[in-house]
Amino acid sequence: MGNSDRGDVQIAIHLCKGCSLCIAACPKGVLTQGTTLNRQGYHAVTYSGSGCTGCGICFYVCPEPGAITVRVRKEDKDKPAA
């Protein structure tokens, strides 16, 4: 597992309002605007599936509580800082 793939972003599609704040804030650019509409009629954000560093910036800029969850992979949390 590479150094730039330490986290995983989960987006609750039904809560996303498609504001794109998380896309603009992501330092790795792994979030994109989706092409299909969610049940509220918004183009929800999607995660590319790899490249997340687990920084959590997307979580903090999202105005919708619970829409974004960032998980840091356990094997990387246990490693000492280099």
Image: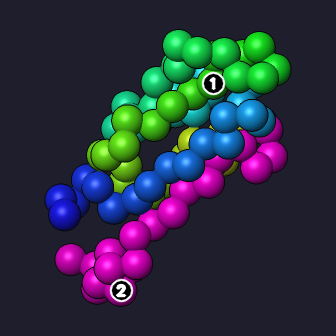
Label 1 vs label 2, nearer the camera? 1
On screen, residue 14 versus residue 25, left or right, reads: right
The residue stretch that appears in magenta: 63-82
**SS under mark 2:** loop
Q: In this orientation, which residue lies closer to the viewer: 67 or 38?
A: 38
Look at mark 2 in the image and give the residue it sits on: 78
Q: In this orientation, which residue lies closer to the viewer: 47 or 65?
A: 47
48 in relation to 66, above or below: above
Residue name at image x 45 percent, y 32 percent: 31
* Quarter of the image that includes the C terminus: bottom left
Residue name at image x 40 percent, y 70 percent: 73
**Residue 24 visible in rendering:** no
Q: Counting other residues with Cα less than 10 Å from the Cα at mark 2, is it few (<14), some (14-19), or many (20 or more)? A: few
Inspect the magenta stretch and tell me whether residue 36 lies in it: no
Q: CA distance from mark 1 to mark 2?
A: 33 Å
Residue name at image x 63 percent, y 24 percent: 44
Kind of residue sitting beneath label 2: Asp
**Residue 58 visible in rendering:** yes
Precedes in sequence: disc 1 or disc 2: 1
**SS under mark 1:** strand
Which quarter of the figure has residue 45? top right
Q: Are marks 1 and 2 in contact (CB under 8 Å)?
A: no
On screen, residue 2 versus residue 5, left or right, reads: left
On screen, residue 34 versus residue 65, left or right, reads: left
- In percent of width and height, residue 11 lies at 61, 42
